[in-house]
Amino acid sequence: MSTDTPLILRVAVDAPVAGLFDYLPPVARTENTPAPGMRVLVPFGRSQRLGVIVALATRTEREPDRLKPVASLLDPIPLLGAADLAFVLWAAGYYHHAPGEALFGALPARLRRPLPPLESGEPGWRLTAAGHAGTDSLTRAPRQAQVVRLLLAHRSGLGRAELRGHLGDCRSALRALAARGWIEPCRIASVPRIAGGAAATGPELDVYQRRAVDGVQGAFGGFRAFLLEGVTGSGKTEVYIRLLQTLLAAGRQALLLVPEIGLTPQLLQRLTGRLEAPMVALHSALQAGERERAWRSAATGEAALVLGTRSAIFVPLPRLGLILVDEEHDLSFKQQEGFRYSARDLAVRRAQQARCPVVLGSATPSLETLHNARRGRYAWLELPQRAGGASPPELLTLDIRAQPLRAGLSPVLLRLMREELGNGNQVLLFLNRRGFAPVLTCHECGWVGECSRCDARLTLHRAANRLWCHHCGWLRAVPEVCPNCGETDLRPLGQGTERVEAELRDLFPDIPLARIDRDSTRRKGELERLLGAARRGEIPLLLGTQMLAKGHHFPGVTLVGILELDQGLYGADFRAPERMAQLVVQVAGRAGRARRAGRVVLQTRHPEHPLLLSLRRRGYPAFAAAALEERRQAALPPFSHQALMRAESRDEQAAASFLERAAHAATDLAGREVTVAGPVPAPMERRGGRYHAHLLAQADRRPSLQAFLTAWLVRVRALKGGSGVRWSLDADPQEML
Ligand code: ADP
Ligand code: ZN
Ligand code: ZN
């Protein structure tokens, strides 16, 4: 290599393409020197795209004089460090996703556009007291009114870039408002951080908690994965807090991942009360600017603790010393579209890369994680008893065959409810189906309301007077007469939460009731309000979907009724029983947290189902052991590894025939170790007007599957004639939809 070889920038371009692209540095001289981790704007095809420099090189496999220079360099300093780049690129490789898309997916949304990063302590504007009062009088100055409305929603002010991002150039409106004295300049704090409070002391740890804390602390400074299996209420959060206290005191950073629904103000409050370190929360409800600043404060090391949902796994943390994944079995850790990663699985990889411990905590660990603990790859920590001496709830199954049901409630369950409510206790009913009824049918001719775009029935939502497809969102008004025969005798079949609520109000007219599901909590703050009232015992009767199942403590609940979960026992997905058991145990865990013991009643038509029996008699660990044995015999994950290729098309045949050709392309690659099955139609073949089909690749060993996928995808990408077909690959799929 001669010394005058030009510097080559290896760029991951934000486009659905595999591989990296080589460019030359920008022609225009800038004060900044290109470095890995900076964003660039590059010519790509006939347009320009964003990219991230992932490496500098002196060689290229292309003709050096055919390389184009990047159009511009967007960042003065790298957004991502070398370790961050390596981690995201590893993830892109593992999930066979375009590296540029993976990298941009890991950035806060604002930086996915060609905008400069927000500076810390950025100058901005906020409303004055006069501005707060004067909102209504701006009807004749719409531009100023827009600014005021925006600032009303951001009480602490907005930076100039944020204002421009929302409203475009609004400088003249800002000048006018400043002249009126309605707004004033301010500095936007660089970290929207939740300052940790003075550390209150916690309870004395029990012997199991002590052992868990000591175990993980003993591994600080090196990689080790732990399963923290603790029944609900056993004090897992307390263990996290102790670990965080030690780690943060040593000046390291920590990442705590929680399921989407688990990021409650309750948890934040508990953490801020006990940790003296600056922390930031990263979740989807943040404004773009807030999110970027939180992200930056993690990346600069200013924030010591990052609390976040799935995507926080990609946040740069230069001093990372511990990763905690709470409720590790939760499906929301898996991204189900686009870049289909599992944040839980990536947490283990990231810990390995950062040489720090990772703790996967759950009352109902996934079978994958249990399997890893059983064969010694993860150290197994157990918290077998409820903290503070609370007793575990008792699980009863109730055979509802041939029982007269009212709103899906059997006479026995109703009697138990009356008893508990009469004694001033709280009752929680769980039904994982919102709406009034899952089916509307004509009693005369048998017509059934079906979605015109999906192989699915329309759910009746009576309050909204709509038939609604829960799969594609299609809506129509409820017909007055049968669209088929014109008769008026249309009847709802089955129960949703809306219907059960109506019946309960009839049965218990004097008892305050709250229904908690996606429909009843659309208004901002409503969910928190209901949960707060429920927790304080102000609402005796609670009815809800899985929104109620996770992370919430209702100390006054003494009876939990699970109305039906039978589809989990015989569902088409081999993971259905696992999910059913996790849900039962999680819902059950809401009961009797304090001194009062709880009872859990599970209504079923299959009381003799072996998995249900083992769950009821011997609890989740026994259930999991039985379910793992079934998986082993069937050679299903975690005893094998899968990848699902999905394809969809408007045309009825196109997706399947594309997959036929993809399967054909695999024949000489698969060898003896990998089997490719299909294509088969997806369980719901027609969804949103498109036809869906699958191809399943499976192997006993992960490396053979990975090697196969890499070679296979090169061929699949080159397949011709798949026009109108969208396809994707899902490594370690969690749902076979
Ligand atoms: P989990 O996260 O496993 O559901 P938590 O950490 O939330 O459990 O603990 C459940 C309840 O028990 C909380 O109210 C907590 O303050 C309390 N608790 C935790 N550990 C102890 C302990 N060692 N002694 C007494 N109470 C405890
Ligand atoms: Zn009819
Ligand atoms: Zn539909």
Image (spheres, rainbow, N blue to C red):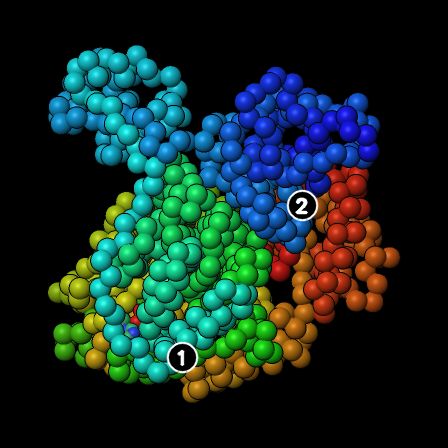
Pick whichever, 181 or 712, lies toward us. 181
Judging from the image, what secondary structure is the residue with disc 1 in? helix
Q: Which residue is mark 2?
A: 727
Query: Does residue 132 appear left or right of residue 589 in this picture?
Result: left
Residue appearing at x 75%, y 34% in the figure:
58
Pick whichever, 710 or 693, lies toward us. 710
Query: Does residue 460 appear left or right of residue 651 in this picture?
Result: left
Residue type pointed to by label 1: Arg
Furthest-bottom residue in view? Answer: 617
Q: Which residue is mark 1?
A: 211
**Total count of labels:** 2
Q: 10 Å neighbourhood of mark 1: few (<14), some, or many (≥20)?
A: some
| Coordinates of residue 521 in the picture (x, y in percent) | 29, 50
- Per the rendering, the mark at residue 641 is none
Pick whichever, 607 or 311, lies toward us. 311
- Residue 133 sits above or below residue 646 on the image: above
Q: 10 Å neighbourhood of mark 2: few (<14), some, or many (≥20)?
A: some
Query: Does residue 669 appear left or right of residue 103 in this picture?
Result: right
Mark 2 to mark 1 CA distance (whole Å): 48 Å
Pick whichever, 410 or 542, lies toward us. 542
Residue appearing at x 57%, y 53% in the figure:
341
Position of the C terminus by quadrant: bottom right
- Residue 704 sits above or below residue 186 on the image: below
